[in-house]
Image (cartoon, rainbow, N blue to C red):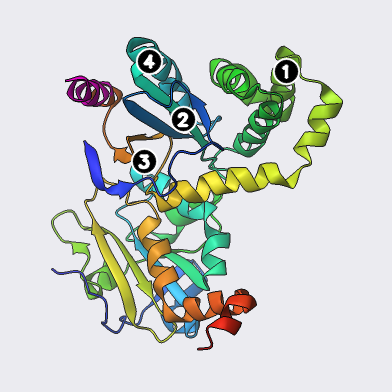
Amino acid sequence: MIVEDARLALPVSDSDHVQGSAHAVVTLVEYGDFQCPACGMAYPLVKQVQRHYAGNLRFVFRHFPLTQAHPYAQLAAELAEAAAVTGRFWAMHDWLYEHQDEWVPYGAAGLEAGARALGLDEEALAATLRNTAIDARIRRDFMGGVRSGVNGTPSFYVDGYLYQGDFDGLVHGLGRVIARREH
Amino acid sequence: MTILAAGTVAPQFTLHSTLDQSVALKEFRGRNVILAFYPADWSPVCSDQLALYNELLDEFARLNAQLLAISVDGVWSHAALARERKYHFPLLSDFEPKGEVARAYGVYNAQHGLAERALFVIDGDGVIRWSYLSPMGVNPGAAGIVNALEALPSNNIQKTLDAPARSAREPS
């Protein structure tokens, strides 16, 4: 079900993390938390959808860390933003979800393994993590989500409208939008 | 039962937050209050909803608002939930007489014996400025609360004070 009264408050822009063409016929925005198990379960499904719809789909990830429920979600988001400085945001995003079961039990030490797995320079990383612009960006994503009606993670928006329902419904919804635009 | 609408004076109440502590609405005169009625401790949707509000306490404080969450659960259930989920706001117990405050606000579901999932924004004068009844299984998020708080005249004045350059051009 697409919720007509819950719209993205912040349009997709150059400052977003985007995969896929700006000319894609449909845009899927996820508000996610790297420590959230439900987001971890959605991750391979999003990948499948991206492969399936290929050039027709643009995917955007925005941070929505629920820091009290998930004590390492904020640090994980910061790590992804630090990786983004050297163009490795998606590599970090993928590692965090693919290895969620492995790093979460070890918290910060588990996250360090992620930095090593990507071969990120530790000193540069530590300096980047101290940059308050990273916190500000994560908070901007978060508050933009709140204003858009995000009520938990993951939350998905199809062409700017909140989708509520299961993942199969989301896939069918994307398919319908693409079919309509192609004709 | 109809949810109290904007413009209504908020019914007064005093409810236990813990075994030996009570919270009264009138303590918050001069500040805004967010009342979040929810059906039950421990149910997944409620917990997501309250987890979201728990992340927004700084934002609510910036808008001069205190969050109070209310269900018909007892204080021990509330205490365990708040500890487990690290909630940093009061969970009030509308326990005896059961649901009395929820009834006063028009959000008691007698069939299920639970408070509905309902939100109120009450201003510093104790008047309801916004109310919203969500389907019981649907997490309403926080956009409505933030919008309602930002629309309060007191918060608009605060914005003007925060932006001196603008207020100089537009004297109020």
Identify the residue under disc 4. A55
Q: Quadrant of the N terminus of chain B?
A: bottom left
Q: Please say whether residue B69 is visible from this viewpoint.
A: no
Provide the secondary structure element on which disc 3 rests.
helix
- The residue that mark 1 highlights is A113
- The CA span between labels 3 and 4 is 37 Å
Q: Position of residue A101 (x, y in %)?
A: 56, 18
User: Within 10 Å of the Cα at label 2, are there few (<14), some (14-19), or many (20+) other Cα atoms?
Assistant: some
Q: In the image, is residue A111 above or below residue B134?
A: above
Q: Are marks 4 and 2 in contact (CB under 8 Å)?
A: no
Pointer 3 chain: B
Q: Who is closer to the viewer here, A81 or B129? A: A81
Which badge, 4 or 1, is on the more N-terminal residue?
A: 4
Q: Residue at the location (69% across, 19% down)?
A: A114
Q: According to the image, label 2 marks what residue?
A: A60
Highlighted range, magenta: A171-183
